[in-house]
Amino acid sequence: MGSTNTIKIRTVTLVDDNAILRVIFSNMIKSFPDFPLQINLFENALDALEYFENKKENLDPSSEIIFVDINMPFMTGWEMMDKLEEFGHDFLNLLNIYIISSSTSRTDREQIQDYPFIDGYILKPIDKLKLYELIRKLNNEA
């Protein structure tokens, strides 16, 4: 395991309409043992897009991990990806984006290929140890 002396990952954002999952996820992030993380929770993609619109001019490179649910009211995770794509590749390259879903559909997994800026697909329920491992890995790569 690489050195974690340099903290690069600062913020974890979850976009999911499931209130229970948001609470569980928040508790997992707050109890991350290596270094403190800011957490942003959004119950829909529209609010998350507004946050990124306001933040896009001063986003630290690779400092943010985003987890986005596919099936949400108002705007799906895929529709959110379409909107994020409009922000441009320079912005997208600053983010670590993961789709989260309870869907085991091959179609959903294959749809990621339409979005080369998405870093992965994670099945719910989210495993705490795997989440921590991912944060550590991204921090060491940043």
Image: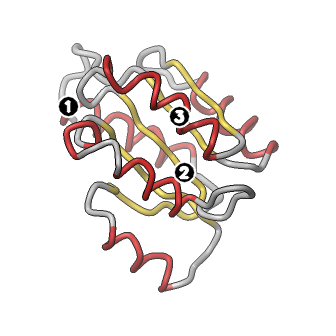
Q: Which mark is residue 142?
A: 1
Q: CA distance from mark 2 to mark 1?
A: 20 Å
Looking at marks 2 and 1 on the same chain, the residue that comes earlier in the sequence is marked by 2
In depth, the one of 135 and 60 nearer the eye is: 60
In depth, the one of 129 and 85 nearer the eye is: 85
User: Looking at the image, is 83 positioned above or below residue 56?
Assistant: below
Q: Amino acid at mark 1?
A: Ala
User: Looking at the image, is 135 positioned above or below residue 126?
Assistant: above
Colour theme = secondary structure
Label 2 element class? strand
Q: Identify the image quadrant of the C terminus.
A: top left
Which quadrant would residue 3 be assigned to in this image?
top left
In depth, the one of 32 and 53 nearer the eye is: 53
Q: Residue at x 52, y 25 (%)?
A: 32
Q: CA distance from mark 3 to mark 1?
A: 17 Å
Which quadrant would residue 56 be assigned to in this image?
top left
- Residue bearing the label numbered 2: 68
Q: Amino acid at mark 3?
A: Thr
Looking at marks 3 and 2 on the same chain, the residue that comes earlier in the sequence is marked by 3
- The 10 Å Cα crowd at callout 2, few under 14, some 14 to 19, many 20 or more, is many
